[in-house]
Image (tube, rainbow, N blue to C red):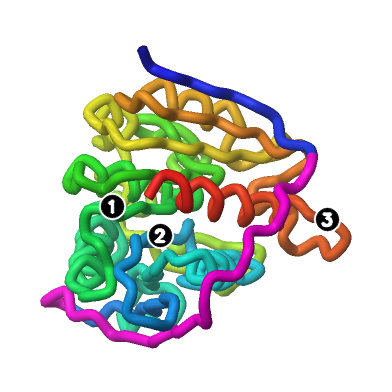
Amino acid sequence: MKRLICSVLVLAFVSLNAFADVLSTPLMLDNGEYEIPAIMTSPEGTAVVPGVILLHGSASHKNEVGDLYLRLAEQLANNGIASIRIDFAGTGDSPVDYTHYTLKTAVRDAEVALAFLRSQPQVDDHRIGVVGFSQGGLIAQLLLAQQPGIKSFVAWSSVASDGIGPFADMFETLYMTAKREGQVEQQFAWRPPLSISYEWFEQVMANQSLSGMAEYTGSVLAIAGSNDTVVPPTAATRLIVASGSDVARAVIIKGADHIFNVLDENANQDEQLLEMTTEWFAEAL
């Protein structure tokens, strides 16, 4: 019987004990068209360990807002888990324009990073997990459809719908320009504007990522904030219900926004998020 758990987190988890010194290695991975900036983080030593790939959200970068992914990578390594995080096309240190970014190219780049992670002698390729943040969660779902051997999936504020879903406002304001001109510029409050390709819009409309989760049988943890106004927190429950997993849990962190209040120095929801994710992978992998 499928075990679904939905809970609201109020108190932070107790910090996990350190495992080892951390080694971080900057990389440039070749996808055949352009290079993908990446960072591999792992515990020092010769022990074979699990590995996790971290997929960032819209218009973000491999370290994520408030260094959430950098911090997660260090916590994972301190608990005996390697990780790799990448910049999608047009973000972070990527050498190409954002018009290269589509759902298909993002999944391809994730697969390149995954192949590199699995090729490392230190990494047990049967104990692989993935984290997806916001749109990165959608990319993770598409990755799982291509790579069903991934053992566990943790979703942060993840998109959980087929088709347009939470991108409806973008389609209303930007789609027709993209269709007419082949691309459209989107403004952001936290960074310079980016040009989004018409192909991205077309692929989002055809997207069946949530339906595809029915075929995924690995464990799933979906975490959302109760105050998220970008992706409704109900998406976390929708994601675990859609999955084919026997172990699926949705957690709503009370008082957290879409980015888990990481920019509020007086809040601790980001710490709760990191502890919960690390603890999950320590058990699931």
Report, in whole angstroms, how far the alpha carbon at label 3 lies from the one at label 1. 33 Å
The span shown in magenta is 11-33
Residue 45 placement: quadrant: bottom left
Which amino acid does the dot numbered 2 rest on? Leu
Rendered residue at 55%/30% (across/down): 250
Indicate the quadrant containing the N terminus: top left, top right, bottom left or bottom right. top left
Please give the residue where the numbered disc 3 appears in the rendered image: 267
Circle nearer the N terminus (3, 1): 1
Rendered residue at 44%/84% (across/down): 24
Which amino acid does the dot numbered 1 rest on? Leu
Please give the residue where the numbered disc 1 appears in the rendered image: 103
Whether residue 193 appears in this view of the structure is no
Which amino acid does the dot numbered 3 rest on? Ala
Camera-nearest residue between 36 and 173: 36
Please give the residue where the numbered disc 2 appears in the rendered image: 55
Magenta part, dominant SS: loop
Residue 120 placement: quadrant: bottom left
Residue 56, disc: none
Report, in whole angstroms, how far the alpha carbon at label 1 lies from the one at label 2. 12 Å
Q: Residue extending furthest right?
A: 266
In the rendered image of this protein, does residue 271 appear above or below residue 148? below
Say how many tags the image has: 3
